Image (cartoon, grey):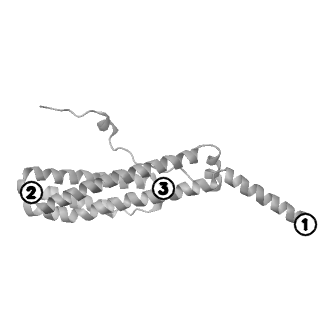
Amino acid sequence: MSSRMSAFTTVATTILFVGLSGCGYNDLQGLDEDIKAAWSEVVNQYQRRADLIPNLVATVKGYAAHEKDTLEGVVQARAQATGIQVTPETLKDPAAFEKFQQAQAGLSSALGRLIAIAENYPNLKADQNFRDLQSQLEGTENRIAVARKRYIEKVAEYNKSVRFFPTNLTAKYILHMEEKPNFTVADEKAVATPPEVKF
């Protein structure tokens, strides 16, 4: 009797493992980890950008102290962007993800205005420290774009697995996984409208 029970247990365990491997259990877990790693890189690059801002603001202030509103705007946007606590749980909350994305977009906008100030101050444009910081900022913006692209690709792969049959059953009923939010363009109409060029 015990050998029959042992045989039954072995067969049941084998069926369970074969069933789990065919239902995408491990693949879903792997994709979830890939998203967390890609997200960490996005956050890392945004932090790199935030770390450059105090030096950039100080350099601009030395040449353009009366541009107070713009300088304060950058400082406030940085404080707002770095004030949002970002955790892997953020990836499960579309509202928190949207808030993070809006704060980063606000900082990008404020930095754009700060960099534009340099056009009005030839001495600032010529300052080696400013040029170095501007170059580092441009490089960081490129790194952010690459990190976001990788994250977008990982989320797309994960979301397909969460939605496609039969892995959707594993995602929903066994792992309780849902689709994760992804980066979006803040104003899709503005992106779709070609810029007006005047001569």
**How packed is label 2: few (under 14 Cα within 10 Å), some, or many (20 or more)?**
few
In the displayed structure image, the side of residue 93 where residue 122 appears, left or right: left
Q: Are the residues at dot 1 and dot 2 in contact (C-beta closer than 8 Å)?
A: no
Q: Which amino acid type is marked by label 2?
A: Ala
The residue labelled by disc 2 is 126
The residue labelled by disc 3 is 35
Q: Which amino acid type is marked by label 3?
A: Ile
Q: Which amino acid type is marked by label 1?
A: Ser
SS for callout 1: helix
Q: Tell me what residue is drawn at x 72 percent, y 57 percent.
A: 17
Q: Are the residues at dot 1 and dot 3 in contact (C-beta closer than 8 Å)?
A: no
Q: CA distance from mark 2 to mark 3?
A: 42 Å
Question: Residue 166 or 105: which is nearer the viewer?
Answer: 166
SS for callout 2: helix
- Residue 194 x %, y %: 26, 33
Say which label, 2 or 3, has the lower sequence index.
3
In the displayed structure image, the side of residue 62 where residue 1 appears, left or right: right
Q: Tell me what residue is drawn at x 65 percent, y 48 percent.
A: 169
Residue 176 visible at all:
no
Disc nearest the viewer among 2 and 3 = 2
Question: Residue 27 or 81: which is nearer the viewer?
Answer: 27
Q: Tell me what residue is drawn at x 88 percent, y 64 percent.
A: 5
In the displayed structure image, the side of residue 88 where residue 112 appears, left or right: left
Q: CA distance from mark 1 to mark 2?
A: 85 Å
Q: Looking at the rendered structure, which numbered label has been put on residue 3?
A: 1
Disc nearest the viewer among 1 and 2 = 2
Say which label, 1 or 2, has the lower sequence index.
1
- Residue 171 x %, y %: 61, 52
**How packed is label 1: few (under 14 Cα within 10 Å), some, or many (20 or more)?**
few
Say which label, 1 or 3, has the lower sequence index.
1
In the displayed structure image, the side of residue 38 where residue 110 appears, left or right: left
| Residue 128 quadrant | bottom left
